[in-house]
Amino acid sequence: MRTSPFQNNLLRNLDASAIERLGLRPTALPLRQELESPGNLVHNLIFIEDGFASMTATFHDGAQVEVAMFGYESVIGTSALLGIKRSPNRVYMQLGGHGFYSHIKAAAKEFDLHDRFHGLVLRDAQAQLTTARQAAGCNARHEVEERLASWLLFCADRARSDKFTISHEFLAQMLGSTRPTVSMAAAALRHRGLIEYCRGTMRILDHKRTEQRACECYQVLKEHFGRSTESAVSSTF
Protein backbone atom coordinates (compact mmCIF):
# COMPACT_ATOMS: atom_id res chain seq x y z
CA MET A 1 0.00 0.00 0.00
CA ARG A 2 1.40 3.39 -1.00
CA THR A 3 2.09 5.75 1.88
CA SER A 4 2.15 9.54 1.68
CA PRO A 5 3.95 12.20 3.71
CA PHE A 6 0.96 14.54 3.29
CA GLN A 7 -2.12 15.10 5.43
CA ASN A 8 -4.10 16.90 2.72
CA ASN A 9 -6.41 14.46 0.95
CA LEU A 10 -5.72 15.76 -2.56
CA LEU A 11 -1.96 15.63 -2.14
CA ARG A 12 -2.18 12.16 -0.62
CA ASN A 13 -3.80 10.93 -3.83
CA LEU A 14 -1.16 12.25 -6.23
CA ASP A 15 1.95 10.42 -7.35
CA ALA A 16 5.46 11.81 -6.95
CA SER A 17 5.66 13.13 -10.51
CA ALA A 18 2.47 15.20 -10.11
CA ILE A 19 3.71 16.55 -6.79
CA GLU A 20 6.95 17.59 -8.42
CA ARG A 21 5.18 19.33 -11.31
CA LEU A 22 3.00 21.29 -8.88
CA GLY A 23 6.16 22.81 -7.38
CA LEU A 24 4.80 22.72 -3.84
CA ARG A 25 6.23 25.13 -1.28
CA PRO A 26 5.54 24.91 2.47
CA THR A 27 3.75 27.86 4.03
CA ALA A 28 2.60 28.92 7.49
CA LEU A 29 -1.12 29.69 7.71
CA PRO A 30 -1.62 31.82 10.82
CA LEU A 31 -4.98 32.67 12.36
CA ARG A 32 -6.96 35.28 10.35
CA GLN A 33 -4.55 35.23 7.40
CA GLU A 34 -6.49 36.23 4.29
CA LEU A 35 -5.97 33.77 1.45
CA GLU A 36 -8.36 35.31 -1.07
CA SER A 37 -10.22 38.63 -1.20
CA PRO A 38 -13.11 39.71 -3.45
CA GLY A 39 -11.99 41.04 -6.82
CA ASN A 40 -8.33 40.10 -6.40
CA LEU A 41 -6.45 37.69 -8.62
CA VAL A 42 -5.91 34.16 -7.35
CA HIS A 43 -2.15 33.57 -7.50
CA ASN A 44 -1.82 30.20 -5.75
CA LEU A 45 -3.61 27.03 -4.87
CA ILE A 46 -3.36 26.35 -1.15
CA PHE A 47 -3.45 22.86 0.33
CA ILE A 48 -4.15 22.95 4.06
CA GLU A 49 -2.35 20.29 6.09
CA ASP A 50 -3.41 21.57 9.51
CA GLY A 51 -6.01 24.18 10.51
CA PHE A 52 -9.04 25.31 8.54
CA ALA A 53 -10.32 28.30 6.59
CA SER A 54 -13.71 29.84 5.79
CA MET A 55 -15.05 31.31 2.57
CA THR A 56 -17.51 34.12 3.25
CA ALA A 57 -19.88 36.26 1.25
CA THR A 58 -19.18 39.88 2.23
CA PHE A 59 -21.77 42.67 2.04
CA HIS A 60 -21.51 46.46 1.65
CA ASP A 61 -22.14 47.07 5.36
CA GLY A 62 -19.19 44.83 6.27
CA ALA A 63 -21.32 41.86 7.32
CA GLN A 64 -20.23 38.41 6.21
CA VAL A 65 -21.73 34.93 6.16
CA GLU A 66 -19.85 31.69 5.73
CA VAL A 67 -20.61 29.80 2.50
CA ALA A 68 -17.87 27.15 2.60
CA MET A 69 -15.18 25.72 4.86
CA PHE A 70 -11.79 24.31 3.88
CA GLY A 71 -9.61 21.88 5.76
CA TYR A 72 -7.25 18.99 5.06
CA GLU A 73 -9.82 17.39 2.73
CA SER A 74 -9.81 20.15 0.13
CA VAL A 75 -7.86 22.81 -1.79
CA ILE A 76 -8.33 26.58 -1.98
CA GLY A 77 -8.22 28.56 -5.23
CA THR A 78 -9.57 26.06 -7.76
CA SER A 79 -11.92 28.66 -9.26
CA ALA A 80 -8.86 30.04 -11.08
CA LEU A 81 -8.44 26.68 -12.83
CA LEU A 82 -12.07 26.78 -13.94
CA GLY A 83 -11.84 30.18 -15.60
CA ILE A 84 -12.61 32.57 -12.72
CA LYS A 85 -9.30 34.39 -12.28
CA ARG A 86 -10.49 36.83 -9.62
CA SER A 87 -11.93 35.59 -6.35
CA PRO A 88 -15.62 36.40 -5.79
CA ASN A 89 -15.31 35.75 -2.06
CA ARG A 90 -13.12 36.25 0.97
CA VAL A 91 -11.20 33.25 2.29
CA TYR A 92 -9.23 33.38 5.53
CA MET A 93 -7.89 31.10 8.23
CA GLN A 94 -10.19 30.42 11.17
CA LEU A 95 -7.78 28.08 12.90
CA GLY A 96 -4.10 28.65 12.24
CA GLY A 97 -1.94 25.87 10.87
CA HIS A 98 0.27 25.17 7.90
CA GLY A 99 0.16 23.75 4.40
CA PHE A 100 1.58 24.00 0.91
CA TYR A 101 1.02 26.30 -2.02
CA SER A 102 1.39 25.80 -5.75
CA HIS A 103 1.63 28.76 -8.13
CA ILE A 104 -1.45 28.95 -10.33
CA LYS A 105 0.63 28.59 -13.55
CA ALA A 106 2.10 25.27 -12.40
CA ALA A 107 -1.30 24.10 -11.15
CA ALA A 108 -2.98 25.07 -14.45
CA LYS A 109 -0.43 23.07 -16.44
CA GLU A 110 -1.04 20.02 -14.26
CA PHE A 111 -4.82 20.51 -14.48
CA ASP A 112 -4.65 20.66 -18.29
CA LEU A 113 -3.02 17.23 -18.42
CA HIS A 114 -6.47 15.79 -17.56
CA ASP A 115 -4.83 13.26 -15.27
CA ARG A 116 -5.41 12.45 -11.58
CA PHE A 117 -5.10 16.07 -10.41
CA HIS A 118 -7.79 17.17 -12.88
CA GLY A 119 -10.30 14.69 -11.49
CA LEU A 120 -9.51 15.50 -7.86
CA VAL A 121 -9.96 19.22 -8.46
CA LEU A 122 -13.34 18.70 -10.13
CA ARG A 123 -14.44 16.39 -7.32
CA ASP A 124 -13.42 18.99 -4.75
CA ALA A 125 -15.22 21.76 -6.64
CA GLN A 126 -18.38 19.65 -6.67
CA ALA A 127 -18.05 19.05 -2.92
CA GLN A 128 -17.81 22.79 -2.30
CA LEU A 129 -20.88 23.46 -4.47
CA THR A 130 -22.78 20.85 -2.47
CA THR A 131 -21.68 22.55 0.75
CA ALA A 132 -22.83 25.96 -0.48
CA ARG A 133 -26.24 24.63 -1.56
CA GLN A 134 -26.73 22.84 1.74
CA ALA A 135 -25.70 25.97 3.67
CA ALA A 136 -28.26 28.07 1.81
CA GLY A 137 -31.05 25.67 2.71
CA CYS A 138 -29.77 25.28 6.26
CA ASN A 139 -29.73 29.02 6.92
CA ALA A 140 -33.32 29.32 5.74
CA ARG A 141 -34.71 26.23 7.45
CA HIS A 142 -32.96 25.40 10.71
CA GLU A 143 -32.81 27.02 14.13
CA VAL A 144 -29.64 28.72 15.31
CA GLU A 145 -28.95 26.19 18.08
CA GLU A 146 -29.07 23.30 15.59
CA ARG A 147 -26.90 25.18 13.10
CA LEU A 148 -24.41 26.10 15.80
CA ALA A 149 -24.07 22.46 16.86
CA SER A 150 -23.47 21.46 13.23
CA TRP A 151 -20.95 24.24 12.69
CA LEU A 152 -18.96 23.29 15.78
CA LEU A 153 -18.86 19.68 14.63
CA PHE A 154 -17.60 20.77 11.20
CA CYS A 155 -14.86 22.76 12.93
CA ALA A 156 -13.91 19.82 15.13
CA ASP A 157 -13.70 17.49 12.12
CA ARG A 158 -11.40 19.81 10.20
CA ALA A 159 -9.32 20.78 13.23
CA ARG A 160 -9.19 17.11 14.24
CA SER A 161 -9.76 18.35 17.77
CA ASP A 162 -12.81 18.98 19.95
CA LYS A 163 -11.19 22.14 21.35
CA PHE A 164 -10.60 25.40 19.48
CA THR A 165 -10.63 29.17 20.02
CA ILE A 166 -13.49 31.29 18.68
CA SER A 167 -15.58 34.27 19.83
CA HIS A 168 -19.38 34.59 19.95
CA GLU A 169 -19.11 37.62 17.68
CA PHE A 170 -17.27 35.60 15.07
CA LEU A 171 -19.73 32.72 15.41
CA ALA A 172 -22.57 35.16 14.77
CA GLN A 173 -20.90 36.34 11.56
CA MET A 174 -20.36 32.81 10.30
CA LEU A 175 -23.94 31.79 11.04
CA GLY A 176 -25.45 35.02 9.67
CA SER A 177 -27.06 35.78 13.01
CA THR A 178 -26.63 38.24 15.90
CA ARG A 179 -24.25 37.90 18.80
CA PRO A 180 -27.05 37.78 21.46
CA THR A 181 -28.84 35.03 19.53
CA VAL A 182 -25.68 32.96 19.16
CA SER A 183 -24.79 33.52 22.83
CA MET A 184 -28.22 32.16 23.80
CA ALA A 185 -27.75 29.15 21.52
CA ALA A 186 -24.28 28.46 22.97
CA ALA A 187 -25.69 28.78 26.49
CA ALA A 188 -28.39 26.23 25.62
CA LEU A 189 -25.77 23.76 24.33
CA ARG A 190 -23.70 24.31 27.46
CA HIS A 191 -26.77 23.78 29.66
CA ARG A 192 -27.33 20.45 27.91
CA GLY A 193 -23.77 19.46 28.80
CA LEU A 194 -22.68 19.34 25.17
CA ILE A 195 -20.03 22.06 25.18
CA GLU A 196 -18.02 24.25 27.50
CA TYR A 197 -16.89 27.77 26.71
CA CYS A 198 -14.36 29.87 28.59
CA ARG A 199 -12.35 32.93 27.51
CA GLY A 200 -12.90 32.32 23.83
CA THR A 201 -12.09 28.60 23.95
CA MET A 202 -14.86 26.26 22.81
CA ARG A 203 -14.77 22.56 23.59
CA ILE A 204 -17.20 19.83 22.56
CA LEU A 205 -17.75 17.63 25.61
CA ASP A 206 -20.06 15.00 24.11
CA HIS A 207 -19.57 14.50 20.38
CA LYS A 208 -22.34 11.93 19.95
CA ARG A 209 -25.01 13.96 21.73
CA THR A 210 -23.91 17.11 19.90
CA GLU A 211 -24.49 15.24 16.63
CA GLN A 212 -27.98 14.36 17.86
CA ARG A 213 -28.68 18.04 18.55
CA ALA A 214 -27.19 19.25 15.26
CA CYS A 215 -29.37 19.80 12.22
CA GLU A 216 -29.44 17.12 9.53
CA CYS A 217 -27.00 19.10 7.38
CA TYR A 218 -24.02 17.89 9.40
CA GLN A 219 -24.63 14.24 8.56
CA VAL A 220 -25.56 15.03 4.95
CA LEU A 221 -22.27 16.84 4.33
CA LYS A 222 -20.19 14.43 6.42
CA GLU A 223 -21.44 11.52 4.34
CA HIS A 224 -20.91 13.47 1.12
CA PHE A 225 -17.28 14.27 1.94
CA GLY A 226 -16.79 10.68 3.08
CA ARG A 227 -18.00 9.35 -0.27
CA SER A 228 -15.79 11.85 -2.08
CA THR A 229 -12.73 10.70 -0.12
CA GLU A 230 -13.54 7.02 -0.62
CA SER A 231 -13.86 7.63 -4.37
CA ALA A 232 -10.45 9.30 -4.42
CA VAL A 233 -8.84 6.52 -2.39
CA SER A 234 -10.35 3.74 -4.51
CA SER A 235 -8.74 5.20 -7.61
CA THR A 236 -5.24 5.75 -6.19
CA PHE A 237 -2.23 4.27 -7.89
Image: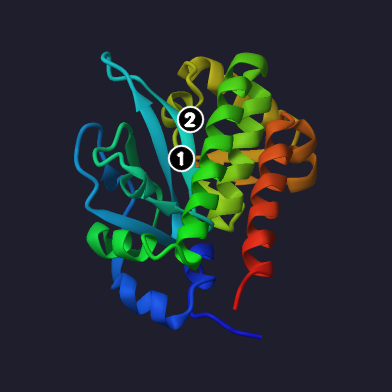
The residue carrying pointer 1 sits among few (fewer than 14), some (14 to 19) or many (20 or more) residues within 10 Å by Cα, namely: some
Query: According to the image, label 2 marks what residue?
Result: 171
Q: Residue at x 68, y 32 (%)?
A: 217
Q: Residue at x 60, y 46 (%)?
A: 203
Is the residue 221 above or below the residue 159 in the image? above
- Residue furthest toward the front? 113
Is the residue 59 above or below the residue 113 in the image? above
Instruction: Identify the mark nearer the N-term, 1 or 2.
Output: 1
Amino acid found under the numbered disc labelled 2:
Leu
- Image spot of residue 167 (x, y percent): 44, 34
Q: Quadrant of the N terminus?
A: bottom right
Name the element at disc 2.
helix
**Rendering quarter of residue 170:** top left
Q: Disc 1, disc 2: CB below 8 Å?
A: yes
Relative to 54, 33 lies left or right: left
Please, which colouring scheme is shown?
Answer: rainbow
Amino acid found under the numbered disc labelled 1:
Ile
Query: According to the image, label 1 marks what residue?
Result: 166
- Image spot of residue 158 (x, y percent): 55, 53
- Image spot of residue 192 (x, y percent): 76, 31
- Image spot of residue 6 (x, y percent): 48, 74
Along the viewing direction, whichever of 65 and 179 lies nearer the viewer: 65
Relative to 33, 225 lies left or right: right
**Rendering quarter of residue 216:** top right
**Rendering quarter of residue 75:** bottom left
